[in-house]
Amino acid sequence: MFGRAIGTRRTLHARLIAVPLAGYAGALLGYVVHAGAPERFWLDFAITMNIVGVAGAIAAALAGASDLRRHVPEAGPARSAARTHAVLNTFAFALFTANLAVYAPRWGDGPGTDASAGVTLGALGLAATFAAVGLGRALVADHNVGAPPRTAADDRPPAPVPPPASGRAPTGIN
């Protein structure tokens, strides 16, 4: 599942995680702004971003489960970190799903809708997501999980660029 055809060495899971992260952050932003200035737009924005975050989390979780099965050794510190990463992401998913259960029926209500639950659940969910992102980064950087195998070519310095044959720097394209 490495994306060499499109020029990246990251797995599908690593490419998808930006969607729930942006959705969760946008939802929290919407709930916070709606709490301070209760307008219909901000509540609808928060609900929309919440939907984007939850849907993106489902896609990222499916790809992450595949990575767990295919790239993480059965025993050792990488497996333990991967399980904690999954638990934190599941916790964040549950919090933002609860936000949807509370606020989706209020789509279009706007003023008069209290956003305190959205702010609280969103802040806890985003904090759990950031903790999971840190563990995911550690899995790749420290345990080399989800990264393609290194080759000897990866460790070679780039070849030096020879000077121009005339001894002068090129002046432009002819």
Image (cartoon, helix red, strand yellow):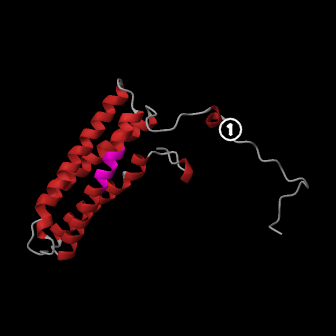
Q: Position of residue 161 (x, y in %)?
A: 77, 47
Give the residue displayed 44% in from the left and 32% down from the top: 142
Residue 36, relative to residue 81: is it above or below? below
Q: Nearer the viewer, residue 23 or 32?
A: 23
Residue 142, relative to residue 50: is it above or below? above
Give the residue displayed 25% in from the left and 56% down from the top: 54
Q: On the rendered structure, is 122 left or right of 156?
A: left
Q: Which residue is mark 1?
A: 157
Q: On the rendered structure, is 151 left or right of 97?
A: right
Q: On the rendered structure, is 142 left or right of 80?
A: right
Disc 1 packing (10 Å; few <14; some 14–19; many ≥20) = few
The quadrant in which residue 80 appears is top left
Residues shaded magenta = 56-63
- The amino acid at mark 1 is Pro
Give the residue displayed 82% in from the left and 65% down from the top: 171
Q: Position of residue 51 (x, y in %)?
A: 24, 61
Q: Nearer the viewer, residue 54 or 69?
A: 69
Q: Position of residue 26 (x, y in %)?
A: 28, 62
Q: Is residue 62 magenta?
A: yes
Q: Nearer the viewer, residue 34 or 85?
A: 85
Q: Is residue 123 magenta?
A: no
Q: Is residue 113 visible?
A: yes
Give the residue displayed 17% in from the left and 76% down from the top: 40
Residue 13, relative to residue 108: is it above or below? above
SS at mark 1 in the image:
loop
Q: Quadrant of the C terminus?
A: bottom right
Per the picture, the main secondary structure of the magenta-coloured stretch is helix
